[in-house]
């Protein structure tokens, strides 16, 4: 047995009431038209009677005194008793029925009254109520709107779209090849290194740093200040010895401990493990395909309750990230920074045999990080990807506006547009092809050199777009729930703004 939807039932009853009201208005119109017709007939009859009376009086030689207001007994008797009866037959109009409802009625009581009303008027509340709430015209219009606005669609790009997208991707790829290059060597990497150094100094200043001593290095002084201010218990840097892991984490060194320590990752996982380690006096590492947790010296977070301690743990994690972002204060050169978000999870892929030493992928990823493939280099790699993204969107807007003559309102480069989505896929695919070709030619078959020259940010963006395109292709014609949610959210905000 189907279960009744109370809201749909109420809508069905309300629709029945509206239909009944429309029918009742038609009845009222018919009755009023009948009354108006009868009134017009009476007016005409009265006019004829007056004309006949005037003619009769004129023939009889009787003059009529307009000032006289008395009515003779004979005339009065004729009007009241002797006049022919012409009664008007107007059908009686019944009152509309409605479920009992007032401001004190609860929802349950109202639904109970709705069900009584439906039973009285033979309204089926079980069988697909929504199919009866719309007229055929409304249903067709709704289906067309859903098809146009809320379904996955395949792109309908022309040759110019593909040419524009590929050109934007090649431009981004050339920027990546000539201005990013190896970590610490390309012009963009040098630029981002300096930007990170500046941000570390600004953060240290906000935390109370007074500047370097006379003749000292300002960045290293700021790093040293942050290292002292934001100490953590999960900062082990060697396998053995002081500040070591007693052999529990293999091949741990100052060059890779930021990568292997999960608390040093600048993402949600890093924040979670950092706070967890500070609360439990532990340190969590990922190494050789395993997640390893070791006990550390007891660590006490500031704060009087759990919420304040969690907040202090978050601030400590953020401050410690800034202290490591530009390398350590004792590094002789560029130093080891923090990893690119989620990069350290590659160490779980401890499979394969690459290079002449037959090393696993996790080992290769570690060596790549040790040679400077860190967060600073990730920022440099993001620049050509961002340029490709912006160029493609700008060119799509220009083509839409000036070639297709669309209104500006229809030229907003939203990700839901299938043609723009396809163009972004082609653009970032072109960037990745240029990047992979350059890395393959310059690496000479060395896996570490190949990954060092690979723009991981670009490949991640391309993979995300490819996933969306496959989903759209697979679900073509199906409802896009994200688009529906966005529309409902915007309508809900409009309703709130009107209250």
Image (cartoon, rainbow, N blue to C red):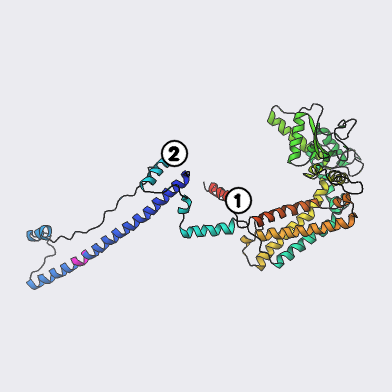
Of 425 and 62, which appears nearest the observer?
425
Q: For label 1, count other residues whose C-alpha is less than 10 Å away and answer few (under 14), some (14-19) or many (20+).
A: few
106 w.r.t. 491: above or below: above
The answer to whether residue 79 is visible is yes
Residue bearing the label numbered 2? 108
Q: CA distance from mark 1 to mark 2?
A: 31 Å
Q: Position of residue 280 (x, y in %)?
A: 76, 29
Q: Which residues are magenta?
A: 42-46
Residue at image coords 77%, 31%: 278
Label 1 element class:
helix
Question: For the view shown, which residue lies furthest in the bottom direction?
Answer: 59
Residue 130 shown in magenta = no
Q: Position of residue 499 (x, y in %)?
A: 51, 46
Residue bearing the label numbered 1? 481
Instruction: Return the disc, 1 or 2, that comes first in the chain's sequence.
Output: 2
Q: Position of residue 254 (x, y in %)?
A: 88, 38
Instruction: Please tell me whether the stretch drawn in magenta is mainly helix, strand or loop.
Output: helix
Residue 45 shown in magenta = yes
Q: For label 2, count other residues whose C-alpha is less than 10 Å away and answer few (under 14), some (14-19) or many (20+).
A: few
């Amino acid at each position: 047995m189907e279960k009744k939807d109370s809201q749909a039932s109420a809508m069905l009853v309300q629709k029945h009431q509206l239909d009944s009201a429309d029918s009742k208005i038609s009845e009222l119109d018919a009755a009023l038209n009948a009354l108006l017709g009868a009134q017009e007939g009476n007016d005409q009859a009265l006019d004829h009677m007056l004309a006949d009376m005037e003619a009769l009086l004129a023939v009889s030689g009787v003059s009529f005194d307009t000032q006289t207001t008395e009515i003779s007994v004979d005339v009065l008797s004729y009007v009241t008793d002797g006049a022919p009866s012409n009664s008007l037959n107007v059908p009686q109009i019944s009152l509309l029925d409605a479920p009992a409802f007032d401001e004190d009625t609860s929802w349950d009581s109202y639904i109970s009254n709705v069900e009584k009303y439906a039973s009285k008027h033979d309204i089926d509340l079980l069988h697909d109520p929504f199919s009866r709430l719309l007229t055929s015209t409304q249903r067709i219009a709704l289906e067309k709107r859903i098809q146009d606005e809320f379904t996955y669609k395949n792109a309908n790009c022309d040759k110019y779209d593909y040419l524009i997208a590929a050109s934007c991707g090649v431009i981004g790829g050339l920027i990546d090849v000539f201005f990013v290059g190896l970590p610490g060597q390309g012009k963009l990497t040098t630029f981002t290194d300096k930007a990170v150094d500046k941000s570390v100094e600004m953060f240290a200043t906000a935390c109370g740093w007074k500047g370097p001593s006379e003749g000292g290095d300002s960045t290293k002084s700021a790093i040293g200040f942050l290292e002292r201010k934001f100490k953590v218990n999960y900062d082990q840097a060697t396998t053995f010895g002081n500040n070591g892991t007693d052999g529990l984490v293999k091949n741990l060194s100052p060059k890779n401990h930021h990568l292997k320590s999960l608390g040093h990752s600048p993402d949600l996982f890093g924040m979670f493990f950092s706070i967890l380690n500070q609360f439990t006096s532990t340190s969590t590492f990922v190494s050789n395909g395993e997640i390893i947790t070791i006990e550390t010296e007891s660590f006490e977070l500031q704060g009087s309750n759990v919420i304040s301690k969690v907040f202090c743990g978050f601030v400590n994690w953020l401050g410690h990230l800034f202290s490591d972002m530009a390398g350590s204060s004792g590094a002789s050169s560029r130093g080891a920074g923090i990893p690119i978000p989620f990069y350290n999870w590659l160490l779980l892929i401890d499979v394969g045999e690459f290079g002449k030493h037959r090393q696993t992928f996790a080992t290769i990823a570690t060596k790549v990080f040790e040679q400077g493939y860190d967060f600073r280099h990730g920022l440099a790699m993001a620049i050509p990807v961002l340029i490709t993204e912006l160029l493609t969107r700008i060119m799509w807007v220009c083509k839409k506006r000036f070639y297709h003559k669309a209104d500006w309102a229809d030229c907003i480069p939203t990700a839901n547009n299938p043609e723009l989505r396809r163009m972004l896929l082609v653009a970032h695919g072109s960037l990745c092809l240029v990047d992979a070709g350059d890395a393959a030619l310059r690496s000479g078959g060395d896996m570490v050199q190949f990954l060092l020259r690979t723009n991981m940010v670009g490949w991640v963006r391309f993979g995300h777009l490819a996933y969306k395109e496959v989903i759209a292709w697979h679900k073509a014609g199906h409802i896009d729930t994200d688009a529906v949610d966005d529309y409902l959210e915007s309508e809900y905000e409009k309703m709130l703004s009107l209250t």
